[in-house]
Image: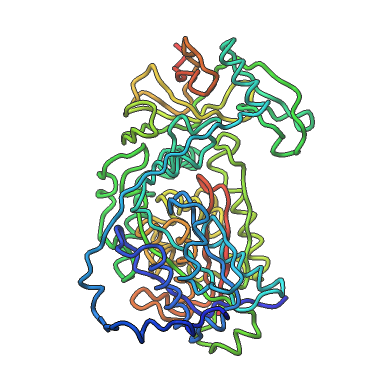
Amino acid sequence: MERVAVIGVGQTKYEKGKKQNFSEMVYEVTTKALKDAEITTREIDNIVSVSSDFWDGRTISCMAIQDAAGAFGKDTSTVEGDGTFGALYGMMRILSGSFGVTLVVAHHKGSESSMSGITNTAFDPLVERKLGIDAISSAALQARRYMTATGVTERQCALVSVKNHGNAMRNPLAQLPMEITVEDVMNSEVLASPLKKLDCSPVTDGACALVLAAEREAKKLSTNKKRVWLMGVGHCSDAYRLGDRDLADTRALEEASESAYEMAGVGPEEIDLAEVYDAFSYMELMWLEGLGLCEEGMSGEYMERGYFNMGGEIPINPSGGRLSSNPVQVAGLSEMAECVLQLRGKAGKRQVKGAKIALAHGINGMCGQSHCVFILGR
Amino acid sequence: MPFGTGENSSIEKQSEVRELGDWKDEVEEIVFPGKISVPYSWTVGSTLSKWYAQIRDDAEIWANKCAECGMVFVPPKIKCINCYRDMNEWVKLPGTGTVETFTVVSYYEPKIHPRKPPFVYAVIKMDGADTGLVHFIGGVKPEKVKVGMRVEPVFEKERQGNILDIRHFRPIA
């Protein structure tokens, strides 16, 4: 099968209350990604945009940013979901043989609306929505279920927040670089037990773009220093209703990651760094197990041993993760951008030395209903 | 006219053009407050309509069962999520269950929360079913709620045929 490469990346700074509107953010990251790839809009054959109508407050939100993405007069299509699924779609379009160089661009402005109100509308209006449940309260149900099933403690989860906010200190694009302690996390305001404020990701604005190209075009357009290959991808979904799943079970992620490893021809032991979807601190521990990066129920102990720290066995979320900046839907794409920078050796102060293979993991739906896993390599 | 050309633009000839390099630093950023309010009427469908009618009329919680794998679902499903089979067997549940997980919510979102914090959500593993039901735990201090606690439903006196006809689940004395 032909390979697909990332040949350009562009990101905004991630922050709350950005002055730019959606189009201005998309224009910024498109321009940056094209410049990074050293190409112009003329080389872009088609565009995949990633956005959510509810977050944007307009229907067919994808159409509104097309001019800013340079899509005028070109083929465009849209994904409403995490950015990893946008990249997956872009990759599939290329592999179908019908499309050339593809721009995948995601935007999000969490600060313009209500996180609680919007995530409540993700729940079934016929059943759970009337209870008022949202992203934080549903995650709290999953957090306690995971802790009950595995024995992982709140303090072990707090270590994830300490590590990721600390990693963000070395990422100029991150929203919340902070030197904090486990006590700071434990003493932060309880939002929905066992989740405290510092266990939860912030409201963030930002955008990210990737330029994807098939092997032949990638080699023509870019140098070996810039190219990063999408070696493998896998995706899988679990049941929609929370009560239809065991919330501590990561079976959908296991499926997704196994397919990604198989396609890439590598195992979890060969991963040099991973960007894992830590919308909440416990999620990083849970997903690490689902990704096969540590044995089931052991991630809390590994975290205590510093296994996932910068300089540890497998640095997890060197960017600072979603706990430090969480532009919903942009998030997975920004993880892939981080992996690309790391694999190029261009991640500045947070560079994982000698990184050759990286993993990016996105989720869609409440409590990680579906997962998309990418393996990227030089 | 081809896409993306400016051939027909003659504005430059007619009006003064000013190059403002740093105008973005000086601009007053304007924000429009807004709100979208759209009424909906969501069709509940035959499976959930039957479920809600039994809660409303008889204060009974029913589940449905897959004839192939035997899995019992509450709330009932249109299709078995494992076997993708029609669900025609209905089972009356005792209504009791066990708290599988819970959270005490401390923040207040008046637009979505039907009650004021602190309140408790739980996933209740229902006796006689294989799935959990998400609902409130009440009739007990939030700090007393535990995983594994046995609970029973408290129904509202006036019932409308929706999930809030169950006021909450309370500990079995």
Q: What is the x, y in percent for residue A333?
A: 49, 65
Quarter of the picture holding the N terminus of chain B = bottom right
User: Residue extending furthest right?
Assistant: B68
Quarter of the picture holding the C terminus of chain B = top left
Q: Which of B23/A284 is in front? A: B23
Vertical order, A376 against B20 (above or below): above
- Residue name at image x 66 percent, y 75 percent: A99
Residue A97 visible in the snapshot: yes
Relative to A223, is B146 on the left or the right? left
- Residue name at image x 54 percent, y 30 percent: A127
Q: Which of A138/B8 is in front? A: B8
Vertical order, A58 against A8 (above or below): above
Residue A167 visible in the snapshot: no
- Residue name at image x 48 percent, y 62 percent: A64
Q: Tag count in the figure? A: 0
Q: Which of A160/A226 is in front? A: A226
Vertical order, A77 against A230 (above or below): above
Q: What is the x, y in percent for residue A218?
A: 60, 84
User: Residue extending furthest front?
Assistant: B14
Q: What is the x, y in percent for residue A173?
A: 34, 69
Q: What is the x, y in percent for residue A226?
A: 50, 84
Where on the picture, by quarter, is residue A73?
bottom right
Where on the picture, by quarter, is residue A96?
bottom right
- Residue name at image x 28 percent, y 45 percent: A186
Colouring rule applied to residues: rainbow
